[in-house]
Image (cartoon, rainbow, N blue to C red):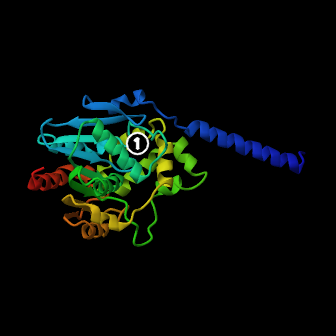
């Protein structure tokens, strides 16, 4: 009969082999841009900016007013598909995959501070020859947008914020599971090695108010684009670099601003809409009682109509 020491050794070997088997079976490798080429369209273009090959699309009349769109965390330029369909008849619509997401991939220096994102956006619009434009952003993209408008007021003719992040929370709130995983040592490795379908589905069910709109195709898009080489590690790096800003910076925004918010947002409370409205001198608010954190994706026609009415009222 084996001694106790050997039985313990056998147990550890068995556990190691079992863990190895799980890793081998469940491991999901990164994918190259070429392997994800089916997420490009004829409108897809790439521009070299600061050592990164940036995926963007520019659609609409070249001589029309320009509208630049910035997506949120874990999303991509696809989140604006409905807006582009509704607005590109009369606007020169520019959207891009931000560093760490979509086909652009990770930031060359793993720098995901909001100031660095604002610099990145400026580099992209400069490369495209844009001087002044309307700017819209959701969540992380909203955070980048309002801080871009605050620090570069001469570039932004008008601003649209959809459930933007960036303000310090007024009360404690539990972050989503995916952000808890990304900020926890050891567990964060799960996000860089594996890609369980349920994790993407659960996250989308959180940001959508209408669960019926979380389709297998939507889940597939978010999951596959997260597998672009370096994106999963970038998500962890971005989460660890999360920062909030002094609300007084809102006072530096001079552009007319439209604030759109889904009342069913479980990531950023709808009460923050009033905080943005109070801080920005020239702003107006529309609350959607039946929408969640990404209203432009959940109800593109309705939100795009409100954006159009706002832009046209300003002559943009």
Dot 1 falls on a residue whose secondary structure is loop
Query: Is residue 68 visible in this depiction of the protein?
Result: yes
Residue drawn 26% across and 46% down? 69
Residue 125: image location, x then y, percent: 28, 41
Q: Nearer the viewer, residue 242 or 42?
A: 242
Q: Does residue 23 appear to the left or right of 143 in the view shown? A: right
Q: Nearer the viewer, residue 193 or 183?
A: 183
Residue drawn 16% across and 37% down? 60
Residue 119: image location, x then y, percent: 36, 46
Quadrant for the N terminus, please. Answer: top right
Q: Number of labelled discs?
A: 1
Residue behind mark 1: 99
Residue 137: image location, x then y, percent: 28, 52
Query: Is residue 195 visible in this depiction of the protein?
Result: no
Q: Does residue 85 appear to the left or right of 50 in the view shown? A: left
- Characterize the local packing of mark 1: few (<14), some (14-19) or many (20 or more) Cα atoms within 10 angstroms: many
Residue drawn 40% across and 67% down? 168
Residue drawn 16% across and 40% down? 88
Q: Which residue is farthest bottom?
A: 171
Q: Does residue 102 appear to the left or right of 252 in the view shown? A: right
Residue 15: image location, x then y, percent: 71, 45
Q: Nearer the viewer, residue 123 or 144?
A: 123
């Amino acid at each position: 009969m084996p001694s106790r020491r050997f039985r313990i050794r056998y147990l550890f070997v068995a556990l190691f082999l079992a863990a190895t088997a799980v890793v081998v079976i469940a491991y999901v490798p990164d994918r190259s841009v070429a392997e994800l080429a089916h997420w490009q369209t004829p409108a897809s273009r790439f521009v070299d900016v600061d050592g990164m090959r940036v995926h963007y699309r520019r659609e609409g009349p070249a001589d029309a007013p320009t509208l630049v769109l910035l997506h949120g965390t874990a999303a991509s330029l696809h989140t604006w598909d409905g807006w582009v369909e509704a607005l590109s008849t009369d606007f020169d619509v520019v959207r891009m995959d931000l560093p760490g997401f979509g086909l652009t991939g990770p930031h060359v220096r793993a720098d995901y501070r909001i100031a660095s994102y604002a610099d990145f956006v400026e580099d992209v619009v400069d490369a495209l020859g844009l001087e002044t434009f309307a700017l819209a952003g959701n969540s992380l993209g909203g955070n980048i947008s309002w801080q871009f408008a605050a620090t570069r007021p001469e570039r932004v003719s008008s601003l649209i914020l959809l459930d933007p992040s960036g303000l310090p929370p007024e009360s404690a709130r539990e972050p989503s599971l995916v952000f808890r995983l990304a900020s926890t040592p050891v567990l964060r490795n799960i996000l860089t090695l594996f890609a369980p379908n349920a994790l993407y589905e659960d996250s989308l069910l959180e940001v959508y108010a209408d669960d019926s709109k979380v389709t297998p195709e939507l889940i597939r898009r978010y999951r596959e684009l997260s597998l672009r080489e370096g994106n999963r590690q970038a998500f962890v790096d971005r989460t660890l670099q999360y920062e909030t800003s002094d609300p007084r910076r809102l006072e530096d925004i001079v552009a007319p601003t439209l604030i759109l918010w889904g009342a069913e947002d479980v990531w950023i409370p709808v009460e923050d809409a009033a905080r943005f409205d109070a801080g920005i001198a020239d702003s107006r608010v529309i609350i959607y009682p039946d929408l969640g954190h990404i209203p432009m994706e959940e109800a593109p026609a309705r939100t795009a109509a409100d954006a159009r009415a706002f832009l046209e009222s300003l002559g943009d």
